Image: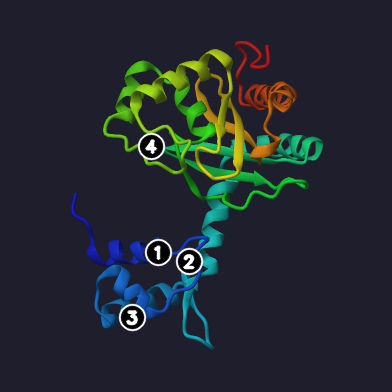
Amino acid sequence: MPIIQSVDRALRILDLFDEHTTELKITEISSLMRLNKSTVHSLLKTLQKHHYIDQDEDGGKYKLGMKLLERGNLVTSHLDIRTVARKYLLELSMKTGYTLHLVIQDGNEGVYIDKVEGTSATILYSRVGRRVSLHCSSVGKVLLAFKKKEELKQILKGYIYKKQTPNTITNEKDFLKELDQVKKEGYAIDREENEPAVSCIAVPIRNHLEEVIAAVSISMPSPRLNDEEIDKIVPKLKQVGDDISRQMGYQHKVLSS
């Protein structure tokens, strides 16, 4: 299938911005894109005309425009699971003070589709729309652990086990062993495998076909994750996963049993 170069370049410009890089000069964009300034200027002006890019009047730096927020809200508003899960995330966050996430799989990554910030523990690395690696996150482990053998094999074919922290699993053999454990226990733990000083516990959410369609996780500062806290949190989190799953049509058995 042929790629339209100008569209490809415009989308790549949008991808340059994230939570760490919120503004860029045209010279920086030109350097990152490896394109001359005149080409980049034309692309930016087109994106700016349609409000996908805004420009700071004082410094001249470019940033993402409000049109992206508008389009993003249209996407998330049609994700029924987000609507169903919201009240359960809020309730558990209020009870525990921790941050709750709702994540779906997109290819070989997870995508945060909702987040409720905890009152006692702020988690800065995550945000709605951000992607997360599957091999080093509790949500990723849950999303993969219940896949059929052939489907899992295809997902992991050529998968790159990028080392995020000293605790990250970096090979398929250890990762498959971890997934077996997750499947047996019904929940997954990330002990500073994705982000330093942050640990997470996740459980699956299933639909009427008994497929795992999402994961819900609870995140906390690592010093708070001990055996006592795990024993206290896991049943509550499994109950939330079970409640959301039932709302999504899952009837086989309760996940918290």
Q: Nearer the viewer, mark 4 or mark 2?
A: 2
- In the picture shown, does residue 4 fall above or below 182? below
Which disc, if any, is residue 21?
Answer: 2
Q: Earlier in the sequence, mark 2 or mark 3?
A: 2
Circle 3 crowding by C-alpha within 10 Å: few under 14, some 14–19, many from 20? some
Name the residue type under label 4: Asn
Looking at the image, tell me whether mark 1 or mark 4 is earlier in sequence order. 1
Q: Which mark is residue 41?
A: 3
Q: In this rendering, which labeled residue sits more in front, label 4 or label 3? A: 4
Helix, strand, or loop for circle 3? Answer: helix
Gap between marks 1 and 4, in whole Å?
A: 20 Å
Q: Position of residue 178 (x, y in %)?
A: 46, 22
| SS type, badge 2 | loop
Residue 209 visible in the picture: no
Q: Is residue 143 left or right of residue 233?
A: left
Disc 4 secondary structure class: loop
Residue depicted at x 69% and y 39%: 86
Taking the spot 35% from the left edge, 80% from the top edge, the residue there is: 27
Residue bearing mark 4: 108
- Determine whether label 1 and label 4 are within 8 Å by CB: no
Residue 256 lies in what quarter of the image? top right
The answer to whether the residues at label 4 and label 3 have Cβ atoms under 8 Å apart is: no
Corner quadrant of residue 48? bottom left
As shown in the figure, which amino acid type bears the numbered disc 3? His
